[in-house]
Image: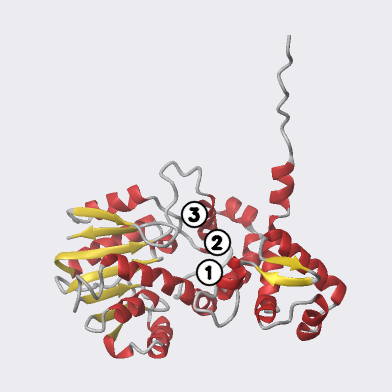
């Protein structure tokens, strides 16, 4: 009788997950030293790179070789070459540069070590709101690092929504505008639209700077407000955007904000929600689920929510129709139509 092959359970995943933090640190250090940018400029040997970055040659070679194994570099006759992903996303000055995104994780490094404590106490390990000075300082560092990546998502969203094509001249409220990435992308797509950026007064200082830098400040008005507590208007706007706000606010506050936006929209107006949405059973999509844990660490009520949850919140707020629109991002847009 033929024996069936044995399928032994391997601890390999445990080993890899135990050292997963090493990948983050290696990539973050490579961005710190601008290794990919230097290689793109012709510094391709370990010795050249060691000189231009003022680093130890032995140690740098170890990091460079590890970046090869990670898929960011490849070796060719004693030199290091960029791979498509590093050439496209990790060379400073490129339109799609993601170096700032890599570095934003450094702000969360210490709080993640306190996850066990967070689970025991139910309290975040780092303030996230703007109502506390220390929380705002954290936020002030975080937002500029995420501007570029959020703006790229928003530009794709503007195109998918038909801004500047089928939809022109809209009055748009960017709720919890933050860096202004969504409002700026919409303004760039349609020079005839107007953007009302709504957020805390301190945050709007950053929004204004970004709008000025991107050449669209003339299309903006800035409304200092607490988006959870203050009224947002009535039958006034053609569209509202709620970008990466709900995961930080949590279910209770998000439902309240959505209800106020519904009131502020004209009949036929649209609320566009851009978020990180896990699979409906909350069991497969690692990034969106672990990002929920990130919100556990940084906020009092935050989490990631499914498309079905957002749909139910929109309908409960009075939106008659809800659509999902695919964009080049982790999750599709969820659009409620009044």
Q: Earlier in the sequence, mark 2 or mark 3?
A: 2
Which residue carries the number 3 mark? 288
Which circle marks residue 127 in the picture? 1
Q: CA distance from mark 2 to mark 3?
A: 19 Å
Which circle marks residue 124 in the picture? 2
Asked which quadrant contains residue 37, the reply is bottom right
Q: Is residue 189 left or right of residue 88?
A: left
Image vertical order of residue 116 relative to residue 189, above or below: above
Q: Position of residue 39 (x, y in %)?
A: 69, 78
Asked which quadrant contains residue 98, the reply is bottom right
Task: Give the residue at x 33% y 87%.
Answer: 216
Asked which quadrant contains residue 115, the reply is bottom right
Mark 3, secondary structure of its residue: helix
Image vertical order of residue 319 relative to residue 106, above or below: above
Q: Earlier in the sequence, mark 1 or mark 3?
A: 1
Image vertical order of residue 124 relative to residue 100, above or below: above
Asked if labels 3 and 1 touch by Cβ distance under 8 angstroms, the answer is no
Comparing marks 1 and 3, which lies closer to the viewer?
A: 3
Furthest residue toward top: 1
Q: Is residue 291 left or right of residue 199?
A: right
Residue 183 visible here: yes
Q: CA distance from mark 1 to mark 3?
A: 21 Å
Mark 1, secondary structure of its residue: loop
Q: Position of residue 96 (x, y in %)?
A: 50, 74
Furthest residue toward front: 77
Task: Give the residue at x 59% y 63%.
Answer: 125
Mark 2, secondary structure of its residue: loop
Say which quadrant the N terminus sits in.
top right
Asked if labels 2 and 1 touch by Cβ distance under 8 angstroms, the answer is yes
Say which quadrant the C terminus sits in.
bottom left
């Amino acid at each position: 009788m033929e024996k069936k092959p044995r399928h032994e359970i391997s601890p390999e995943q445990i080993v890899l997950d135990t050292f997963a933090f090493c990948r983050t640190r290696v990539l973050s250090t490579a961005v710190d030293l601008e290794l990919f940018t230097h290689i793109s400029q012709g510094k391709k040997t370990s010795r050249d790179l060691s000189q231009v970055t003022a680093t130890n040659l032995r140690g740098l070679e170890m990091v460079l070789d590890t970046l090869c194994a990670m898929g960011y570099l490849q070796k060719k006759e004693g030199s290091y070459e960029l791979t498509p992903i590093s050439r496209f996303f990790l060379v400073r000055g490129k339109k799609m540069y993601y170096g700032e995104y890599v570095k934003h994780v450094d702000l969360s490094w210490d709080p993640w070590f306190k996850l066990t404590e967070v689970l025991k106490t139910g309290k975040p390990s780092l303030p996230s709101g703007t109502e506390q000075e220390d929380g705002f300082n954290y936020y002030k560092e975080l937002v500029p690092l995420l501007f570029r990546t959020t703006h790229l998502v928003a530009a794709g969203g503007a195109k998918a929504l038909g801004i500047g094509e089928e939809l022109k001249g809209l009055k748009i409220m960017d709720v919890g505008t933050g860096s202004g990435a969504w409002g700026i992308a919409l303004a760039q797509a349609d020079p005839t639209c107007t953007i009302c950026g709504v957020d805390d007064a301190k945050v709007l200082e950053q929004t204004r700077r970004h709008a000025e830098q991107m050449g669209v400040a003339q299309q903006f008005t800035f409304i200092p407000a607490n988006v959870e507590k203050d009224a947002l208007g009535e039958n006034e706007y053609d569209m509202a955007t709620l970008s990466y706000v709900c995961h930080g606010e949590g279910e209770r506050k998000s439902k309240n904000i959505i209800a106020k936006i519904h009131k502020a929209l004209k009949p036929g107006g649209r609320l566009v929600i851009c978020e990180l949405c896990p699979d409906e059973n909350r069991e497969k999509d690692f990034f969106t689920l672990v990002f929920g844990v990130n919100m556990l660490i940084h906020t009092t009520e935050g989490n990631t929510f499914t498309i079905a949850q957002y749909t139910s919140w929109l309908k409960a707020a009075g939106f008659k129709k809800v659509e999902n629109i695919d964009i080049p991002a982790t999750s599709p847009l969820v659009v409620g139509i009044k």
